[in-house]
Amino acid sequence: MIGSRIAIRQLWVMILVAALVLSLVQGMGVGVQTASAAVSSKTIVGYWHNFDNGSGFIKLRDVSPKFDVINVSFAEPTSGVTNGTIGFTPYNYTEAEFKADVAYLQGQGKKVIISIGGQNGQVQLASTTARDNFVQSVTAIIEKYGFDGLDVDFEGHSLYLNTGDNDFKNPTTPVIVNLIAALRSINNHFGTDHFYLTMAPETFFVQLGYSFYGGSCISCDSRAGAYLPVIYATRDILDWLQVQNYNSGPIIGLDDQYHTMGNADFHVAMADMLLTGFPVAKNNSNIFPALRPDQILLGLPANANAGGGFTSVTEVHKALNAIMKGIQLPSYQMRSSTSGFADFRGVMTWSINWDKFNNFEFSNSHRAYLDAITPPVPDTQPPTAPANVTVTSKSSTSVSLSWTASTDNVGVTGYTVSYGSQSVESTSTNVMINNLTPDTTYVFSVSAKDAKGNQSAASAPLTVKTEPSNSGQDTIPPSLPSNVQVVSKSASSVTLNWNASTDNVGVVGYTIAYGSAMIQVLTTQARISALTPNTSYTFTITAKDAAGNTSTAASISVTTDAQAGAQAWAPNVSYKVNDEVSYSGNTYICRQPHTSLQGWEPPNVPALWLLKP
């Protein structure tokens, strides 16, 4: 979607076509749909990287609590563009760990949604077989990992309109018709009350439909406005639309003027089109109706690295002031309402990872703004009681417990494990309790608490007897981790694995140290990222047991790869400013972010590429 993974392909096509066929419309006569009841709080959505692109990898449970919805990015096709089968494999996670982190966020009151598509996830449901494969595979992914819903982030050539398909209310193009049917089928399977359906199209696929509609215009891109029939056909089950107001060319607003991304004017004009409705391809007999204010979020990049069109906090708040409070901009007067929409949904960003990279400017600033408009409701409701408390391991002096996460109307912040007159605190759904007496019976119970201090009822009690003491406290360290090997490496990362250590009681984890840094892992594989290119590192690996005994260290020296030079130019690649490519023996420097297409070879588009001296 978004950032280095996603970009708009249509900037120059759009400008050229506009110059050729633009004509102004007189008198719109567009009605405004009645808004639904105001939402109780404002929503911040963030996309979470299921990959590492230089912004830094983040475990789900470490996502900033300022986000309400986490879109896991991305599930992608596994059998080609047209087969319809979608797959998802958690990056840098075991399945069990990933499921636990999804449940952890849900226990905090967050919604975790799987996003399908992105730049590398072209999906064309051109046949009913592909439609059925899509429904079956997406349903299986949602059920397997416990996701709360589905975000449709189809880009590139996933959606298009066949020639003559000019009525968005009655589409005939198979990739459109089959997608609509698939989304309704998935929603029906899970039930609207328990399932979130959201979409994140680019401006090219939505607002550009005011000027050009792919199925009815001559010499314009067949993808122009191609999301409109999908949005229209699912508007009754669509929770929200978060158009990507970035990586976009200039777009004509309802004032028939071009609006350029990166400022409040652009965001207000783009939102106003959705809040007012508009004649598709400027045909006043073919009106795309307005969405409810609570169905719309502004899509924004978290920082300048995340995508073209970064908008400062000040400009975003100007836009929100106009949309929500009616404080109109001098450059654009809203057609939908000059008094504002108090129930406008909120903001979305690409991405959670880039937000952390940028010291949480996006989530902190916009959370504070939205909370000031709709203060959080006082929380007096306690979490549910933890369930299924079980013993995962024990020794003569320790017991490890795990349990099913509690839920809360706002969010669970931690757990208290009580035994006798003592207790320990945990922020996760597992804990190791040390310094116990050998061969002694303990009764454990777990309660949950939220940020306001509301405490749940205690779990059902669990009786556990520690192991007898053989020779007092465990002082035997684990064996040396052996056969350390490099699984893969790049200019910025190294992945290692090794044979498991053994211990008289049990190994509980490994520590990988390099220089002054270290990471902790539970398994016999680790990926170390954020390294310096062409640099030698010595990694030492030690195993530890529940008593804190540490093994002798195993070590391996690895030199990261050199930073790659200019790569050969290729179509369908997302390029950012200052990227270098080679073509026909020359080197070119990228002038502005874009995704390449056939015909956009560097010598052909000097506006995008500068020949390097």
Image (cartoon, rainbow, N blue to C red):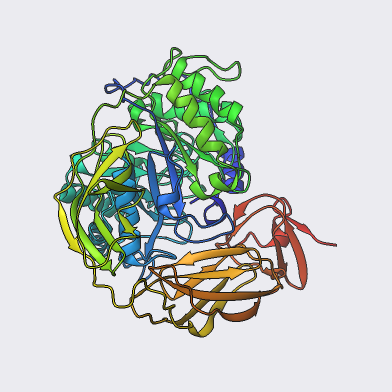
Along the line of sight, which residue is nearer the eye, 591 or 565? 565
Residue 61 drawn above or below residue 361: below
On the image, the x and y values in percent for residue 285 come to 34, 28
Occupied quadrant, residue 409: top left
On the image, the x and y values in percent for residue 196 come to 28, 43
Image point 64% across, 65% down: which residue? 531
On the image, the x and y values in percent for residue 530 come to 61, 62
Residue 388 visible in the displayed image: yes
Residue 195 drawn above or below residue 287: below
Image point 53% across, 56% down: which residue? 5
On the image, the x and y values in percent for residue 170 come to 27, 42
Along the line of sight, which residue is nearer the eye, 358 or 62? 62
Left/right of residue 134 with respect to residue 499 in the rendered view: left
Image point 25% across, 49% down: which residue? 405
Label total for image: 0
Image point 34% across, 30% down: which residue? 452
Residue 494 drawn above or below residue 16: below
Q: In the image as oriented, which residue stretches furthest toward the right?
A: 613
Residue 500 drawn above or below residue 147: below
Occupied quadrant, residue 380: top left
Q: In the image as oriented, which residue stretches furthest toward the left?
A: 460
Q: Quadrant of the C terminus?
A: bottom right
Along the line of sight, which residue is nearer the eye, 76 or 290? 76
Occupied quadrant, residue 265: top right
Along the line of sight, which residue is nearer the eye, 126 or 446? 446
Q: In the image as oriented, which residue stretches furthest toward the front?
A: 472
Q: In the image as oriented, which residue stretches furthest toward the top?
A: 339
Residue 160 visible in the displayed image: no
